[in-house]
Amino acid sequence: QVQLQESGPGLVPPSQTLSLTCTVSGGSISSGGYYWSWIRQHPGEGLEWIGYIYYSGSTYYNPSLKSRVTISVDTSKNQFSLKLSSVTAADTAVYYCARLDSSGYYVDYWGQGTLVTVSS
Amino acid sequence: DIQMTQSPSSLSASVGDRVTITCRASQSISSYLNWYQQKPGQAPKVLIYAATSLQSGVPSRFSGSGSGTDFTLTISSLQPEDFATYYCQQSYSSSRTFGQGTKVEIK
């Protein structure tokens, strides 16, 4: 059973960089075949796709966030990470890491989510 | 980006009711449409993928239909555990997008 767990600061000052890591267990990122994704949900609102990465390092980012987002993978630690720069209060959200199924079309495994608040 | 519009935004229903939720895409997405269920404090869970395929372990009272721009999620007989928010999501475009959600509440 694949499990994903987000980790990182729950509070980030405005204009700083939000950094989160997702640790994958029960499966190896380097075995290939899957895309690994970050998705967020503003409080009380819907879901927003941030981007996704393949084990080889190829990425896709949401165009509305592309200038501020970097997703990277560390296969030696079986982790992938999110960096979002120049954050504002509008970036306050629950951030989920997730795995796209082998077709790449839907999420079959999710992390539990972590709330990140942007505030001084 | 492809815009996904769900209707209604919320609905009230009773246990045993047949419930239908609609999702419309701003352009044709063939059958690249998935449905998720989210309960408060939990991550979403996929119910239906590729418009009509039931994810393993999901009860058969859930079904999906449609192609092109118009899609439907149907719950044939609403159960107490089905009160939740439902989202559609398109995977036709590399820029994946979700609908705004439909909250199903107890009548």
Image (tube, helix red, strand yellow):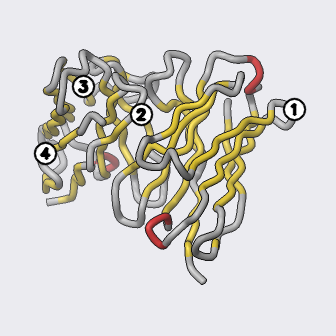
Please report whichever mark, 2 or 3, sits nearer to the chain's N-terminal start.
Answer: 2
Horizontally, residue A25 falls left or right of residue A71, namely: right
Which amino acid is tagged 4? Ser
Q: Which residue is mark 3?
A: B63
Q: Is label 1 or label 3 in front? A: 1
Q: Is label 2 or label 1 in front? A: 1
Say if labels 2 and 1 share a chain. Answer: no
Query: Is B5 in front, or is B13?
Result: B5
Write down the chain letter for disc 4.
B
For the residues labelled 2 and 3, say whether their Cβ atoms are less than 8 Å apart: no
Find residue A119 and report its horizontal and vertical position in percent: 56, 79
Q: Is label 2 or label 3 in front? A: 2
Write down the chain letter for disc 3.
B
In the drawing, what numbered circle is on residue B46?
A: 2
Which amino acid is tagged 1? Ser
Query: From the image, which quarter does the C terminus of chain B lie in?
Result: bottom left
Give residue A54's quadrant in the image: top right
Q: Which residue is mark 4?
A: B7
Give residue B67's quadrant in the image: top left
Which amino acid is tagged 3? Ser
Which amino acid is tagged 2? Val
Horizontally, residue B39 falls left or right of residue B20, namely: right
Write down the chain letter for disc 2.
B
Q: Which residue is mark 1?
A: A76
Q: Is label 2 or label 4 in front? A: 4
